[in-house]
Amino acid sequence: MKVKSEHSSVTGRIEREKRTVDAMIRIYCSNQHNSPANSCEQCNRLLEYAINRLDNCPFQERKPACNHCQVHCYSNSMKSEIQRVMRYSGPRMLLRHPYLSLRHFFDTFRKAPTLKKN
């Protein structure tokens, strides 16, 4: 699955997050599910879910790393799946995708913004 936003106004941080999660899922799927070129159906569903969550993130470009966020937008089952993927892929990202890996690391130091109530 190629990561491309349907919203042309969404750029920068969110797009990079999409590329990062796509790379992590591909690493996980190719090694754990033996999927050669494309991700398996289960991993494609997880990627679509993650992209949807990013598209609907209330913080958008001010978004902190998900584990530092005050809004927990993943369902419990999807949260455990993405955590499993990230635990496996995280250490492997530095060699395969050093730029995304370092940017993701530095994003963990981002202060979580306060969500304004309507």
Image (spheres, grey):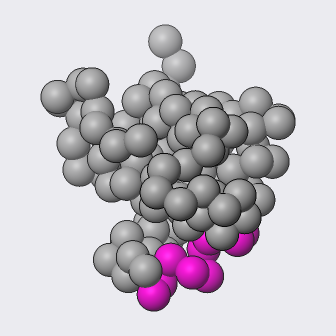
Residue 79 coordinates in the image, percent (x, y): 75, 43
What secondary structure is the stretch in magenta mostly built from? helix
Residue placed furthest toward the left: 8
Q: Residue at x 56, y 38 (%)?
A: 44
Which stretch is magenta?
87-95
Q: Residue at x 57, y 81 (%)?
A: 92
Is any part of residue 19 visible from this angle?
Answer: yes
Quadrant in which residue 47 is drawn: top right
Nearest the viewer among 55 and 59 is 55
Nearest the viewer among 53 and 108 is 53
Residue 16 coordinates in the image, percent (x, y): 33, 55
Quadrant in which residue 55 is drawn: top left
**Quadrant of the image for the N terminus?**
top left
Asked whether, in this view, residue 80 is left or right of residue 9, the answer is: right
Quadrant in which residue 2 is drawn: top left
Residue placed furthest toward the bottom: 95
Residue 54 coordinates in the image, percent (x, y): 46, 36
Q: Residue at x 43, y 80 (%)?
A: 96
- Residue 46 lies within the magenta run: no
